[in-house]
Image (cartoon, helix red, strand yellow):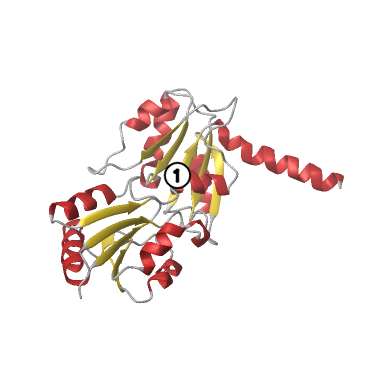
Amino acid sequence: MLKNPKLTVVGAGPGDVELFTLKGVKALQSADVVLYDALVNPELLEYAADAELIFVGKRKGCYAYQQEQINDLIISRAKSHGHVVRLKGGDPFIFGRGAEEMEIAAEAGIEAAVVPGISSSLAVPAYQNIPLTKRGSSESFWVITGTTRAHKLSEDVKLAAQSSATVVILMGMSKLAEITACFRESGKNNTPVAIIQNGTTPEERIGVGTIDSIEEVVQELKLTNPSIIVIGEVVRHREQLLNLQNKMAYAS
């Protein structure tokens, strides 16, 4: 007997499989079809051993499916198979299209639910001992997409550059020169910057500098996407903690 059609949009987290949620595991175990993105750790698919697995992500600018085709797959597979899990990197409501896909499903009469994931905007800096808020350094943080739907730099970057908040920019590597220019215009030339590539995975790499030096750091280390840009005084915590740990190790 065919199950009632259902869509569950699941956040796969930032990359480390141990950061995936128990609720996400249960959703995959009950899935009949899994539509998964490029940034999803493939180990997670082992939880969906009995499901049809369809890659719908983007690699090096090449789309396996356009969004309209993904929407069609969600509807058709839910009606023909039952439970569709849409597995998306990070949290599906943060610069993903999870909300849009749920609306599409609901309009087609398909039950829709979401399982939040740990966002890379929080977890990736944390894995490098960079807190987004810290007493005396930052009272708030911005999470901004570096590239808008029109492939332009978000206007919010200019606003964020004028604040004292920590600024986290996703999908911003291609706009790095424009981003640093915004911060220079606000007199933030010496503000610390960290760029973290492949965060929370064994391939994780980091480059640290300032607004004035970070482009040179990126060139030297050959940092590329997928990377997260963290701008703010909290970046200094990483080195401060490392120095304290080294002192303790030396003293012992």
Q: Residues within 10 Å of mark 1 (few under 14, many from 20)?
A: many
- Please count the marks in the image: 1
Q: Is residue 7 above or below residue 144?
A: below
Q: Amino acid at mark 1?
A: Ser
Task: Classify residue 63 as left or right of residue 223.
Answer: left
Rendered image quadrant of residue 176: top left
The quadrant of the rendering that contains the N terminus is bottom left
- In the rendered image, is residue 189 in sight? yes
Residue 218, percent from left and from top: 49, 47
Identify the residue at the far left of this view.
108
- Front-most of residues 78 and 208: 78
Rendered image quadrant of residue 179: top left
Report helix, strand or loop for mark 1.
helix
- In the rendered image, is residue 97 in sight? no
Residue 215, percent from left and from top: 48, 42
What's the residue at 42%, 72% (across, down)? 46
Residue 157, percent from left and from top: 37, 32
Task: Classify residue 181 as left or right of residue 76.
Answer: right
Residue 232, percent from left and from top: 52, 32
- Front-most of residues 117 and 164: 117
Identify the residue at the far front of this view.
1
- Front-most of residues 74 and 216: 74
Name the residue carrying label 1. Answer: 121
Task: Classify residue 201 as left or right of residue 183.
Answer: right
What's the residue at 32%, 68% (across, down)? 31
- Front-most of residues 88 and 8: 8
